[in-house]
């Protein structure tokens, strides 16, 4: 079977650090094109274009596009790619709104091409093992602590502070993508406090309380102001002891001991994308984005001091 010819759209940090190496490491794909008006990045064997229109006008054959752009511009690009007969991989979050993601899902269904909303944190080493362990336990309480330094992870990225950029929910949605995967019951928001800098449109911190359908409380603490060691932890208290997913899901702590494995998040994403294309399927789970949207709907806004990079 010939490799899937892929174009990567948007050459920011996540594309350079994760997508390009994952594509290079998967024989199912061949990097055919790069699209970014401001990037000087070049990869041997891949053509570079300023716009997606320029790529399509050139006539270069591509089978799939990977959208690593800010979410505010992703819908138009994805819709154009599907209309031109390309499969589409959406970085997280899959869009700026739930409605536009639903429209893309319907377009993909009609066109017959694959649409994949990729939640990379679900492919962290401990996630599936945690899901299996929790399936037969009585869950008593869940705590999610996701604290990091925005200056380290998103330096100078002004789009992330604008409407649709999500602010602290950009990393926080990773935690929700894990929680919606490992917890056996659906859960929903009860209350939220969103702390937003006086000079920004998106929150820098959030405190939330969720409840699952059995009444179990899930507390979530997000903060982008943490310096020093970073915290990406999910703790689940059960009748059989406590489970902890640490380091963003890479380390699983069970009553029986600690389990670690190699980081294969993006390798897992691309393996799944290739299988979806081969089988003519799509995978568009919006559960994490729905919970973030609910936080903006229900959350109390608290103005905090201005933030500058």
Image: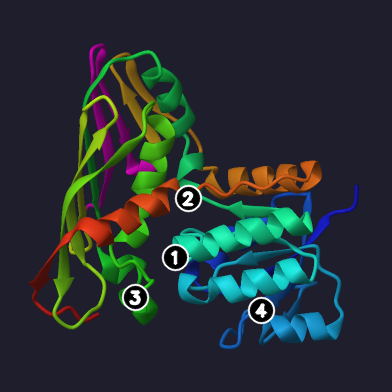
Q: Which mark is residue 35?
A: 4
Q: Which residues are magenta?
A: 226-249
Q: Which mark is residue 74?
A: none
The colour style of the image is rainbow
Q: Earlier in the sequence, mark 2 or mark 4?
A: 4
For the residues carrying marks 2 and 4, which lies nearer the camera in this image?
2
The residue at the point 80 percent across, 44 percent down is: 278
The residue at the point 62 percent across, 52 percent down is: 116
| x, y percent for residue 130 | 40, 26
Q: Are the residues tagged 1 and 3 within 8 Å (C-beta)? A: no
Residue 254 located left or right of residue 273: left
Disc 1 versus disc 4: distance between alpha carbons? Answer: 23 Å
* Residue to which mark 2 is pinned: 286
Residue 236 visible: yes
Q: Residues within 10 Å of mark 1 (few under 14, many from 20)?
A: some
Q: Earlier in the sequence, mark 1 or mark 3?
A: 1
Q: Secondary structure at mark 3?
A: loop
* Residue to which mark 3 is pinned: 163
| x, y percent for residue 8 | 66, 69
The quadrant where residue 134 appears: top left
């Amino acid at each position: 079977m010939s490799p899937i010819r892929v174009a990567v759209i948007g050459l920011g940090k996540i594309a350079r650090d994760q997508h390009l190496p994952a594509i290079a490491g998967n024989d199912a794909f061949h990097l055919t094109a790069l699209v970014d008006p401001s990037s000087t990045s070049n990869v041997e064997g891949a053509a570079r274009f300023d716009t997606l229109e320029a790529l399509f006008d050139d006539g270069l054959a591509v089978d799939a596009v990977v959208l690593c752009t800010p979410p505010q511009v992703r819908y138009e690009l994805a819709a154009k790619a599907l209309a031109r007969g390309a499969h589409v991989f959406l970085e997280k979050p899959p869009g700026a709104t739930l409605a536009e993601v639903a429209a893309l899902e319907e377009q993909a269904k009609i066109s017959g091409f694959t649409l994949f909303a990729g939640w990379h944190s679900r492919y962290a080493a401990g996630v599936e093992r945690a899901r299996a362990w929790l399936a037969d336990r009585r869950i008593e309480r869940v705590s999610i602590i996701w604290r990091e330094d925005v200056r380290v992870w998103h330096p100078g990225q002004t789009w992330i502070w604008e409407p649709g950029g999500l602010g602290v929910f950009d990393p926080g949605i990773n935690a929700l993508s894990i929680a919606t995967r490992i917890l056996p019951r659906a859960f929903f928001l009860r209350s939220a406090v969103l702390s937003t800098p006086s000079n920004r449109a998106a929150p820098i911190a959030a405190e939330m309380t969720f409840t699952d359908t059995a009444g179990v409380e899930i507390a979530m603490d997000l903060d982008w102001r943490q310096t020093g060691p970073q915290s990406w932890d999910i703790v689940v208290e059960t009748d059989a002891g406590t489970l902890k997913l640490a380091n963003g899901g890479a380390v699983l702590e069970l009553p029986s001991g600690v389990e670690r494995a190699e980081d294969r998040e993006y390798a897992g994403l691309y393996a799944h994308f290739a299988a979806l294309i081969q089988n003519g399927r799509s995978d568009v789970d919006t559960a994490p984005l729905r919970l973030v949207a609910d936080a903006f709907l229900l959350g109390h806004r608290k103005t905090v001091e201005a933030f500058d990079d």
